[in-house]
Amino acid sequence: MARLIDVDSTVKAISKLAEDMSINDRAVALLLALELNNEDRFPTVDVAPVKHGHWIREENNAHVEPSGICSVCGSGWLMSDTEYFLWCPNCGALMDEVSE
Ligand SMILES: [Zn+2]
């Protein structure tokens, strides 16, 4: 699996490390930082942060089926007691948080 890094944070970290380096090492580190910023040289991908949430069970409702409320966006969904969505269909939150 590919590992994604935050290039802006990496460049800042390299630049910070370069402050304590000898002049020759500093030049190499700063060239590396410049190269990392070259999007033509390194492929980039679009990523979105993963939202994490949990289902809040709604026991006393007017629905025949039990339902769950997304802790992130508040949308409600009809689900069985044993089969809950792994992702919120509305906001895409990954339902991996442990609920209280
Ligand atoms: Zn949601």
Image (cartoon, rainbow, N blue to C red):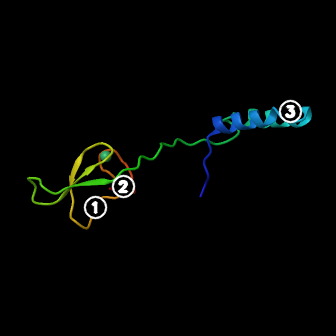
Q: Which of marks 2 and 1 is nearer the N terminus?
A: 1
Q: Which amino acid does label 1 sit on?
A: Tyr
**Residue 91: x percent and y percent?**
33, 44
Q: How crowded is mark 3: few (under 14 residues within 10 Å), some or many (20 or more)?
A: few
Q: How many labels does the image show?
A: 3
Alpha-carbon span between mark 3 and mark 2: 46 Å
Alpha-carbon span between mark 2 and mark 1: 9 Å
Label 3 CB less than 8 angstroms from ligand 1: no
Q: What is the quadrant of the C terminus in the image? A: bottom left
Task: Identify the disc placed on residue 95.
Answer: 2
Of labels 3 and 2, the one closer to you: 2
Task: Identify the disc placed on residue 12.
Answer: none
Q: What residue type is labelled 2?
A: Met
Q: Which amino acid does label 3 sit on?
A: Ala
Circle 1 sits on which residue? 84
Q: Earlier in the sequence, mark 1 or mark 3?
A: 3
Task: Identify the disc placed on residue 27.
Answer: 3
Q: What element carries label 3?
A: helix
Q: Are marks 2 and 1 in contact (CB under 8 Å)?
A: yes
